[in-house]
Amino acid sequence: MSDKVKYEMEFPIQVSPSLLYQYISTPSGLSEWFADNVNSRGELFTFIWEGSEEQAKLLSKKADDRIKLRWVADDEDGLSYFFEMKIQVDEITKDVSLMITDFAEEDEVEEGKMLWENMVSDLKQILGSS
């Protein structure tokens, strides 16, 4: 298995950081745009898409700022990959952006980026920020 490469993306979103945080850190918020359904028990999040299920472990979160997760399959394989959704607020303009950090196989980075773009586009529509 080849090493995954890290990539980062920035999505400007016209919404308050606290509202955005609800959508990136809670099962009910995530199930509106990230997966068909999301459950969490303690630090374990279960994401469900059209019958398939993936679990991710919460690595860290900070209120109104960020959430960082690692897929359990990567964790069990001893891999340190993660995905992070971080809220960035410009100090001067107060513009809000959602910063995504993720990892993918080198030949799947573009596909990964397109997936994030589609999901964040759904999120923006839900938030009325599209």
Image (spheres, rainbow, N blue to C red):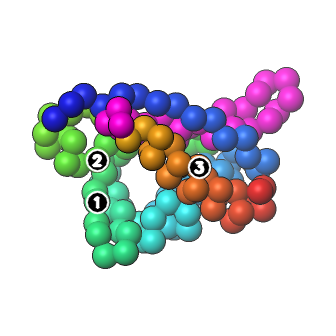
Q: Residue at x 31, y 42 (%)?
A: 70
Q: 116 and 61: which one is in front? A: 116
Callout 1: few (<14), some (14-19), or many (20+) C-alpha neighbours within 10 Å? few
Which disc number belongs to residue 118?
none
Residue occupied by mark 3? 117
Quarter in which the C terminus is drawn: bottom right
Q: Secondary structure at mark 1?
A: strand
Q: In the rendered structure, are the residues bearing label 2 and label 1 in contact, judged by CB atoms less than 8 Å apart?
A: yes
Quarter in which the N terminus is drawn: top left
Residue occupied by mark 1? 54
Magenta span of residues: 82-107
| Coordinates of residue 50 in the picture (x, y in percent) | 37, 75
Single out the residue that lies furthest toward the front: 107
Q: Nearer the viewer, mark 1 or mark 3?
A: 3
| Residue type, numbered disc 2 | Trp
Helix, strand or loop for the magenta stretch, by majority:
strand
Q: Residue at x 65, y 56 (%)?
A: 121
Horizontal arrangement in the rendering, residue 23 relative to residue 38 (left or right): right
Q: Residue at x 30, y 31 (%)?
A: 4
Single out the residue that lies furthest toward the bottom: 51
Q: CA distance from mark 1 to mark 3?
A: 20 Å
